[in-house]
Image (cartoon, rainbow, N blue to C red):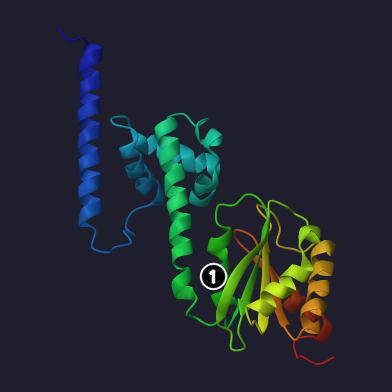
Amino acid sequence: MKSEKDNKENKKAHLHDGHRERMRERFLASEDHQNSSFQTHELLEMLLFFSVPRSNTNETAHRLLAEFGSLRGLMDAPNNALLQIDGVGKSSAMLIRIVSALIRAYNCETETYRSSVPFSGVDVTMEYLRPMFFGHRSERMYMILLNNIGYRLDTVQLAVGTSSQAVIDRKRCIQQALNAGAANVILAHNHPGGSPLPSQEDLDFTDAMERAFSAVGICLLEHYIVTETAYYAIIGERNLKRYGRGGKS
């Protein structure tokens, strides 16, 4: 005969099964493709259905979001940090890392669309830049090459895994821009988990690159520092301080 404990466990398993089925049906019946009626912890709970066969994944979902502070924090979390969370095994950690990689791939795939849109303002530029830095915990720098009316010709990764612009080969940057026939250039690098405010090294590097590009007839439009929640436009802020909002010296 089954013990009272076994009966309770079986009853609990049936309750979980019923809850999971209701969640699936609700998800599939959702009329909008974005499933905006679901909260983040509910979506995460359903994702964990695929790696946790029977247990209550709702509690694990809440625990993950509380530990890492947000969905972005969770998607950026390294594997060993995920495995420290109660209820997260190797399969769940791998599933989360796969989803994070898919998000990054999706963001990169939209580059084809964004390439057909001119870089006409900071909103368009940030829409292009933010996905490039998503999920990266090391600093990296990119150079966006534009024609004379703002359409993207190419994007070049200049450095990765360093916080120093000293490693940038300036002559190579200039040559790449000339080879692409660029009339304008945008530089961007990230400050992972930090402030968007520039260091003195950032300011000096920007000034040096602006002079170098200008010498060959190319305009350095901007050098952006990007974080998860903010950005800083070095040239724009410098000009604002120099000339004021009226644009006069």
Given residues 78 and 105, the one toward you in this image is 105
The residue at the point 58 percent across, 73 percent down is 154
Horizontal side of residue 191 vs 23, given as left or right: right
Q: Residues within 10 Å of mark 1 (few under 14, many from 20)?
A: many
Considering every residue shown, the one lying at the far top of the view is 1
State whether residue 102 is above or below residue 78.
below
Question: Which residue is label 1 attached to?
Answer: 128
The residue at the point 76 percent across, 62 percent down is 168
Horizontal side of residue 173 vs 86, given as left or right: right
Residue 3 location in percent, x, y? 21, 9
The image shows a total of numbered marks equal to: 1
- Quarter where residue 238 is shown: bottom right
Residue 124 visible at all? yes
The residue at the point 21 percent across, 44 percent down is 22
State whether residue 104 is above or below residue 98.
below
Q: Amino acid at mark 1?
A: Tyr
Horizontal side of residue 17 vs 188, given as left or right: left
Residue 88 visible at all? no
- Quarter where residue 200 is shown: bottom right
Residue 126 location in percent, x, y? 57, 71
Residue 26 location in percent, x, y? 22, 51
The residue at the point 78 percent across, 68 percent down is 170
- Quarter where residue 130 is shown: bottom right
Query: In what element is the residue under mark 1?
Result: helix
